[in-house]
Image (cartoon, rainbow, N blue to C red):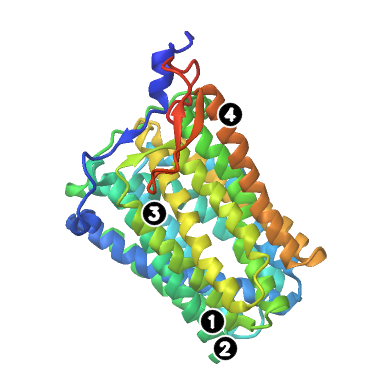
Amino acid sequence: MTPPSAQQAAALTAPINLVSARPPWRATFSSLKVRNYRIFAAANLVAVIALWMQRVAQDWLVLELSGSVTAVGITVFMQFAPSLVLMPLGGLLADRYSKRRILIIAQSSAGVLAAVMAVLALTGTIAVWHIYTIAFLLGLATVLDQPARQVFVNELVGPAQLRNAISLNSSIFQLGGMIGPAVSGVLMTAVGGGWAFAVNAVACTFTVVSLACLRRSELVKIAPGPRTKGQFREALAYVRRKPTIFWPTVMAAFFAVFGLSLAVLMAAYADNVFHTGAAGYGLLNTLVAVGALCGALASTRVTVLRLRTVIGAAGAYGVVLALSSLAPSMATFGAVMVVAGFVSLMFLTNANQLVQTTTNVQIRGRVMSIYIMVLIGGQALGGPLMGALAEHLGPQWAMVVAGAAPALAAVVIAVLLARRGELTLKVNLRSARHPVVIVRRSAKPPVLAGADC
């Protein structure tokens, strides 16, 4: 294979001009003009609220039954472990078969599992091993759901509205994360967590009905990929070849293993540091979601996608987590969690958009499965790790580690990209808006991918 020229390498990570001017605020929800997407988004909001309710109830139930933060981490591992091994299969299926049909199967399976969990919890017969088993089976459903869900958005709205729909999906997920944990905390305190699982079972049923109501004639058809040998190897080579996919994926690995174990650490803070119980744990999850919702909405205003913005947001998230370990009170810690939620979603949404918009549609399912495998599978490794650190070193030191790792990874990646792109920092104290900017050291084009990173 012939190596790319300097000009070709420079183009690989050049800024992606999305629109010529910043869109007006009324365009923030422009993808909702599409009927199919409106139905999908409404069902998604209901499903996400219920899913967050189940997640919070599940984690707290494990903590109550076992008294161990490590056990909460193991639950996370069981739920996300299938993604480490099987997510590429989900990507292949998403490229070959109807995404709508795959989503119906996945959501039906999730609904049955939620119903079983509800019966066990409400009858008082549930044990930790039940939760581990159901979490693992739910992880199998996630393998089907996530690649198909990511790619299905393009069929719902088409390429013109894809970025807006991705941002709104993130906003919906975080709005659900803002409402769901708060409702779950109140529900657990009042009548017990079993009802949260029952609500999720109903929500999955609603999602299946909504998917069945979509007008298939209005979907943007994407020709299925051919069945050939080595398709996953082809996707891996594609990821390695494109810096706008490779570097966000590498950053996502550190982000997921350390930073996305925040729920485990917040459970430790609520139980062992601030002693606020289930209601406090639900509140902390809600505060993270408030910031994340603002971050997701802010991402709809971005006119240019840059690799350096993605890496910088991940690094900022790490710094915020490390600083949160110094919080002296629940109020201060909660305020920092809002900021953490904001910068985390700036990374997650912009990285998702960068990966999707720079991937050929014929291979997008497989590429997204690799990205999701790293993002979700990383949580499978990080959950037990951060839970054990919180239990043996204390929640504060575990939070320092959770923040320091992605922050350091972002610095290393930024240095590598800067060297390859011959970039440097220029300080201009006369500019209040841009006191520090990234400039090229010379007019010479970069010899490797990483320009305008």
Q: Earlier in the sequence, mark 2 or mark 3?
A: 3
Q: At label 1, which amino acid type do we have?
A: Gly
Camera sees residue 430: yes
**Are there few (<14), some (14-19), or many (20+) residues within 10 Å of tag 3?**
many
The answer for how far apart the CA atoms under marks 4 and 3 are is: 39 Å
- At horizontal 71% and vertical 54% (from top left) the residue drawn is 401
Q: At label 4, which amino acid type do we have?
A: Leu
Q: Confirm or deny contact between disc 2 and disc 1 (CB under 8 A).
A: yes
The residue to which callout 1 is attached is: 185
Left or right: 34 in relation to 90: left
Q: Is residue 85 above or below residue 293?
A: above
Q: Earlier in the sequence, mark 1 or mark 4?
A: 1
The answer for how far apart the CA atoms under marks 2 and 1 are is: 6 Å
Which residue is farthest top?
2
Q: At label 3, which amino acid type do we have?
A: Leu
Secondary structure found at label 1: helix
The residue to which callout 4 is attached is: 416
Given this view, does label 1 or label 4 mark the residue nearer the observer? 4
The answer for how far apart the CA atoms under marks 2 and 4 are is: 50 Å
Q: At label 2, which amino acid type do we have?
A: Thr
Q: Which image quadrant is residue 55 in?
A: bottom right
Left or right: 10 in relation to 125: left
Q: Confirm or deny contact between disc 2 and disc 3 (CB under 8 A).
A: no
